[in-house]
Image (spheres, helix red, strand yellow):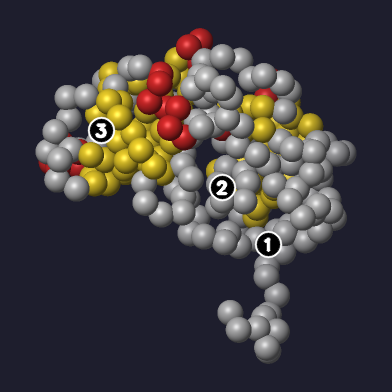
Amino acid sequence: MARRPAGSTPRDGGRRGRTSSAIGKIAPDAATSPKAPAPKPAPLPVPPDPNLVLLGEFGRAHGLNGEVRLKSYTGDPRAIAGYGALLTADGRSLTLADVRLAPGSSPDMLIARVKGVSGRSAAEALNRVALFIPRDRLTAPEDDDEVYTADLIGATAVDEAGTLVGTIVAVPNYGGGDLLELRPTNGGATALLPFTKAFVPVLDMAQRRVTVAAPEDLFAPPGEKPADDPG
């Protein structure tokens, strides 16, 4: 599966990087499940300005002392605290005073303290507030296999013949690597595709388009469970 790049400095933005092959050497023609292995994430917030890049989004308050949960989209999740002042969609500027990993298995969920925010009520007011940064404050991706998460959302996916396959609606990571969640052209249930060179051989972010080598049954409904399936 795709790696989540983490550079030696915190200025790596919300980049995603493809690897040469997937864990377990998944073949390009292997069937992938149209069902996510965990609850489907909410769509990423849309930047109010195309020159802004999404770095994170606050969740519910944590405790009584002003801490708040924060989902980070940076390569190293804790690096989000190293960018200084971050912008909100309504024009506010917020600075993270401290972050730490949140309990649980999600690698990108943090517990954060925000400068000037104290008490549970103030922390609750941050719920669903997204954090952005001007693109010119970010370093450029190190190579052609790295892109910003925000640039993938909404990009079209085509097959090698140029036929439209669907639209990228999310880039979830359930611990095994980054995935592209694709919504088919004609609507219906989404499907997941590993973000690897085998499955995503071409990235064209200038045209907001990726080329995918998807199995024919990518959007096929799941079949019936075997009688001996304990799930």
- In this rendering, which labeled residue sits more in front, label 3 or label 1? 3
Q: Which residue is mark 1?
A: 33
Residue 205 in view of the camera = yes
Q: Secondary structure at mark 2?
A: loop
Residue 147 falls in which quadrant of the image? top right
Name the residue nearer the viewer: 96 or 200: 96
Residue sticking out furthest to the bottom:
227
Task: Report the residue at 68% width, 80% height from top.
Answer: 224
Q: Residues within 10 Å of mark 3 (few under 14, many from 20)?
A: many
Give the residue displayed 50% in from the left and 55% down from the top: 40
Mark toward the start of the polypeptide (2 vs 1):
1
The kind of residue on which mark 2 rests is: Asn
**Residue 166 visible within the image:** no
How crowded pointer 1 is (Cα within 10 Å; few <14, some 14-19, many 20+) is rated as some
Numbered mark located on residue 173 in the image: 2
Q: Residue at x 22, y 24 (%)?
A: 115
**N-terminal label among 3 and 1:** 1
Tell me residue 9's x, y (percent). Answer: 52, 20
Horizontal side of residue 28 vs 61, given as left or right: right
Residue 158 vertical placement versus 137 (above, below): below
- The nearer-to-camera label among 2 and 1 is 2
Q: Quadrant of the C terminus?
A: bottom right
**Residue 92, percent from left and from top:** 26, 20
Residue type of the residue flagged with mark 3: Arg
Mark drawn on residue 113: 3
- Looking at the picture, does residue 48 appear above or below residue 32? above
Q: Residue 227, image x and y in percent?
A: 68, 89
Q: Which picture quadrant has residue 204?
A: top right
In screen coordinates, is 97 left or right of 28? left
The Cα atoms of the two marked residues, 2 and 3, are separated by: 24 Å
- Residue 35's place in the image compared with 156, above or below, is below
Q: Disc 2 to disc 1, how far (Cα)?
A: 15 Å
